[in-house]
Image (spheres, helix red, strand yellow):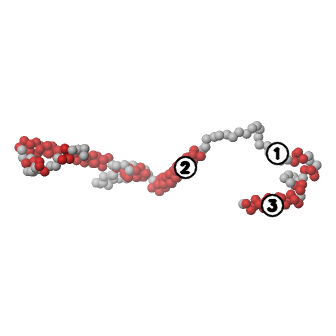
Amino acid sequence: MAAMSLLRTAASSLVSRVRPGLRGVPGGSALLRGVPPSSAVPVRFEGHGKRLFEIKATTYYDSRFLKLLKYYLLLAIVPSAVAITLINFFIGPAELAEIPEGYVPKNYEYYEHPITRFIVRCVYKDFQDINEQEMHQIHVISDKRLLRQYENIARKSMRENGDGPWHYYETLDMNLIDNIPKSTPDE
């Protein structure tokens, strides 16, 4: 790049030495053609009035957000559209058929569209499964309540009859307890 620039400046200086009338004017020498020298100066017409530098907020983050939004939407929408089109084209909606004797249909088999059937089968839980789970939780809570009642009855009976486990354990001798740290707590 620098070599091309150097070559261009060298070529222009060489041309201006060989033909001195062609210096800076694209049409040749103005003096040789009879044109006044004031009209030989190139003029730039940029606009009217004083040009001001406008200070505007940057749009970099806005455009970046919109580009990323478009990218991720297309990243999700295009494969989804292709998958939905292929499913509708090759699999298609379900058809009604006779139910064999003794067969209990599953809950997702009642839906017509294959995508809806997939969502109901894999994402949502069956209402019967949810009901069984709730009944199991109620059974566990009921068992805990019964065990607490039995424990309270046993403790009440032990207190009334005086036959609790505390009669079978010997208590420590009071002389074995070291109370010296309690007498001087600031040391």
**Residue 151 in sight here:** yes
Residue at (78%, 61%) from the top-left corner? Answer: 7
Task: Tell which of 172 and 25 is nearer to you.
Answer: 172
Q: Residues within 10 Å of mark 1 (few under 14, many from 20)?
A: few
Residue 6, percent from left and from top? 77, 60
Residue occupied by mark 1: 43
Q: Is residue 3 left or right of residue 85?
A: right
Inter-mark Cα distance, 3 to 2: 49 Å
Viewer-nearest of discs 1 and 3: 3
In the rendered view, would you say 10 is above or below 125?
below
Tell me the quadrant of the picture where the N terminus can be found: bottom right
The mark that comes first in sequence, 3 or 2, is: 3
> Which amino acid type is marked by label 2?
Leu
> Which amino acid type is marked by label 3?
Ala
Residue occupied by mark 2: 68
Task: Tell which of 6 and 141 is nearer to you.
Answer: 6
Viewer-nearest of discs 1 and 2: 1
**Residue 117 in sight here:** no
The mark that comes first in sequence, 1 or 3, is: 3
Residue occupied by mark 3: 10
Under circle 1, the secondary element is: loop
Residue 28, percent from left and from top? 88, 53
Q: Residues within 10 Å of mark 3 (few under 14, many from 20)?
A: few
